[in-house]
Image: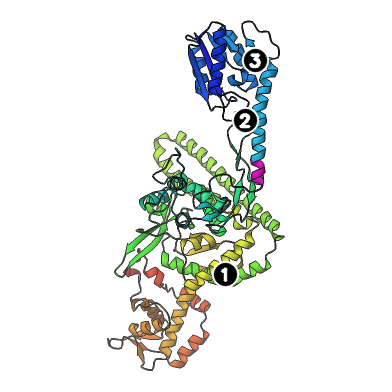
Amino acid sequence: MNAGYVRLSRDDDKRNYSSIENQKLIINQYAAEHNLVIDRWYEDDGVSGYIFDRPGFKQLMDDLNKDIDTVFVKDFSRLGRHNAKILLLLDEFQERGKHLIVIDDHYDNEVSEDDTIGITTWFNERYVKDTSKKIRHALGAKQKEGTLMTQPPFGYRRTGKKKESLEIVPKEAECIKLIYDLYIQGCGYRKISTYLTQQGAPTPSMIRRERELEEGRNTDRHVAAVWSDGMVKDILDNDFYIGTFRLRKRARNTVHGKDKRVPKDEQYVFENHHPPVIDKMTYDLVQELKEKRTKSRYKGSRGQWIGSEIPNPFGSCLYCKDCGSKLTSIERQTSARVRKYYICSTYNTKGKRYCSKAHLIEEQDLMEDAVSYIRMCRNALCEVITTYDMKDFAAEQKTIEEKCIAIREDIDEVKKQLRTLFSQKIKDIASNPDNEDLIKESYESIQQDLTARVHALELKHDELKHTELETPDVKDKLHTALEVVDKIIQKGTMNRKDIEILIERIEVDENGLPEIKLKYGLSDLVHYSAAEELNRHENEVILAAMCLIRDDDRGFTSAKYLSKHLTNMGYPKSTKSVLPYITILIERGIIEPCEDKLKPYTIVKSKAEIEEMVTNLHNSDVNRWYAGNGIRVYSERERHRPEFRPGDQPEH
């Protein structure tokens, strides 16, 4: 059976190469001259000859083993344009005993002894490589000029007479901003895509399809009906949305090869090329969060949009000081309101055996501590911006590297202890097989402590390696941070975005007191202790209560009277919250309980004696006096914790 093979590539110059029908005509005429008939045709239209994974060609080669005896082609270039593969193909025809006739190149494998075949096939390959080279050079020239040759991404459209400029599509831009905001709030790709689909937001392919129809174009492009994780990720990854035009992100090393990612320093980058949808600070923050979430295996937090059960502004930076686990959010219903807390996730899920304390802290208290610290850092941040010198960058890097080396040495030492522990455990079990369970239980707690220590050290190592001061554009970030600080001071609270910009890490100790580490090295400049701040506040209340008693001419006082006047001075309003301070005043001998309910506490000391005490008592003296007399002051914060029991409160 005789077969004809024809091929035409879209890359071929139509003026120099025959169409599919002309190739068939030439082959039919040649066959007729030799009293032959073409019984079957194999065809590849619009497929490059440099590749051999062509449907028609593959079918032809499969049928050679069946009923095909002779194959006719117009010339070698129709058979293929890869020199080495064509020569191997000719050998394959010989080995299979099949007849191949190439008409225009006067080749017949049964009679030909032409030694110039290799040159002919080399020229054919050279043609496709030259064409590919010219196309790459032309594209490269346009890329160097910053010419947008493809459709603009979601959020933009072409404008102008020649469609040479770009403008923002407001509705699409709002969707992009929402995606960035949701990600910063703690949502992952899946939650964002699900939310957009539920809200009926059109996908990028839907928008493109509508635009094509408006322009009178009709394509077979696939249109996605729902948002996917990949769509959200592409939008969050694309720096096109901050006005940066990046070209030559992918390139091919060979003709029709696979595209490979080009390193960023070899790409063509045009800053401020078009109007941005997202500001650079927000984009950089998202990239930082993505890297942080990848390292910590972040799984997202529930409810970060409308209908949220537990908003979680501190979710990405809050850790247990003892075991290193993240703190998870919970809520407790009280008689007055719903109180929101953070608790060690290990303690919450596994119990005291894995982390001894709950490390519980109320969100409102944590917010107050963070805002107070940031307020203290405001002037220091201004000073850092003013005095920051890029020459100090190398020294800062060196310090970070030294700290990382020290931490790595600690990690190796702890791991060595773990290995020794495992080895000893195996020996003990081998020596006393009857007590295997008891031995395992004895070693388990030590093993858990060492493992938790390794985990905490590794987290600290990662934080040091990715500190903000490692980036040379830190001064610009400092200016942005100062703007955020001023806004926080003005409104007195923080949202998730503010926290991500300013706070590096918060560790909560077993007493529920936070250790806050700010970015940009601010924590090294301004000292802050939540415990000291809490004590200072409690001491202020006690001294204020002493002053109120000193100025009371009635000769007695009450919890209601003190609460009312302390509230007017700006302290929390609560009659019960005054009781611990009344206990201190009783112990100090300033007042004493009275049987008359109308006069609950009689003032014992004179005004002069109380004035002397107020004058001489400093906060440090108060602390020492408390400790010396074994008195425990329960703060407002402690009394409202879920695990606090009324019996723990002083009697008076």
Mark 2: amino acid:
Val
Q: x, y percentage for residue 582?
A: 38, 80
Going from N to C along the chain, the mark reached first, 2 or 3, is 3
| Label 1 sits on residue | 377
- Label 2 Cα neighbours within 10 Å, binned few <14 / some 14-19 / many ≥20: some
Q: Residue at x 45, y 89 (%)?
A: 610
Kindly indicate whether the residue at mark 1 contacts the one at mark 2 (C-beta within 8 angstroms).
no
The front one of 257 and 509 is: 257
Instruction: In the rendered view, tell whether residue 154 sits above or below residue 334.
Output: above
Nearest-to-viewer mark from 1 and 3:
3
SS for callout 1: helix
The front one of 321 and 478 is: 478
The front one of 597 and 461 is: 461
| Label 3 sits on residue | 105
Q: Residue at x 52, y 25 (%)?
A: 45
Mark 3: amino acid:
Asp
User: Looking at the image, can residue 7 be seen?
Assistant: yes
Q: Is residue 145 magenta?
A: yes
How many labels sit on residues? 3
Q: x, y percentage for residue 608?
A: 47, 93
Query: Would residue 492 appear left or right of 111 to someone viewing this image?
Result: left
Mark 1: amino acid:
Cys
Q: Residue at x 62, y 18 (%)?
A: 76
Going from N to C along the chain, the mark reached first, 2 or 1, is 2
- Label 3 Cα neighbours within 10 Å, binned few <14 / some 14-19 / many ≥20: some
Query: Would residue 644 appear left or right of 126 to someone viewing this image?
Result: left
Going from N to C along the chain, the mark reached first, 1 or 3, is 3
Magenta region: which residues? 139-148
- Which quadrant would the C terminus be assigned to in this image? bottom left
| Label 2 sits on residue | 255
